[in-house]
Amino acid sequence: MRVLGSGDADLPPRGEYELPLLENRRESPTSRTFRFSTKGTGFRYLSNQAIRLALPGVDDPWGRARLFSLSSSPTEPDILAVTCKISDTPFKRALARLRPGDTAYVFGPVGRFLYDASRPALFLAGGIGITPFRGMLRFATDRGVTQPITLLYSARVPEELVFRRELDAIARSSPLRSVHYTVTRPSDSSKTWSGHIGRIDEEWISEVVDLSLRPRVYVAGLPEMVQAMVILLEGRLNVPRDSIDFEVFRGY
């Protein structure tokens, strides 16, 4: 099973699409998932590429379009989904107002943050950086990938652990899937948290994953989180640079 390519010829063709919204779903107090229909369009993507999504009539200083990693999997037929935080920008407010049947303009697929099913994988997610890993885990589960996957997922408070119920179900479905959570500011939540506390660090990574298996390591989150993780992986954890891939989330 090959989902990594050596050149652009290995990637699905890009196109422009006008897609209707199927569902606008709340995932956490600050994030939502938007599912669009791709039925009849021929849209194809790899696990887990991205799209550029534009909304007509939006006047935003950052522009009328945003780049989103897909939170859906290629194994989910006739849909694509993006999951994002709803910040106080004109674009995000317009996105949050979308209702089923409303349309958005999509260009893609784009990106090369691609899951390699031939190797063990370690996913390091910070906040909404969980987005592509939901798609990758769904893909691996649906395809019966036999390589192990370990996810370490950090959020500020427990209620911001997006997809937690589904991630737990995936972990229960196979001993090859392992999901671990940490919360950085449990005192900011009204919910009791008895799990791991603090940021993803060297000690926690070494505790939950066997790096001697030489997994491919994927990192996704805000710029400062991604930078810190790459420095840690290349430095104290001695992960080869060509075994690390990352995707930066800007949040606007």
Image (cartoon, helix red, strand yellow):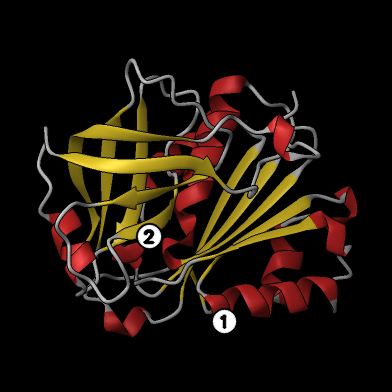
Figure quadrant of the C terminus: bottom left
Q: Is residue 26 left or right of residue 232?
A: left
Res. 212 image quadrant:
bottom right
Q: Secondary structure at mark 2?
A: loop
Residue at x 45%, y 52% (from the top left corner): 131
Circle 2 is placed at which residue position?
161
The relative height of residue 35 versus residue 203 in the rendered view (above or below) is above
**Residue 205 percent across, percent down from the top left:** 70, 66
Q: Place residue 176 in its image quadrant.
A: top right
Amino acid type at image mark 1: Glu
**Amino acid identity at mark 2:** Leu
Image: 107 above or below 140: below
Q: Which residue is mark 1?
A: 224
State which mark lies toward you, 1 or 2: 1
Badge 2: few (under 14), some or many (20 or more) residues near its Cα, within 10 Å? Answer: many
Q: Earlier in the sequence, mark 1 or mark 2?
A: 2
Residue 175: give its label. none
Q: Depth check: give the residue in front, 147 or 109.
A: 109
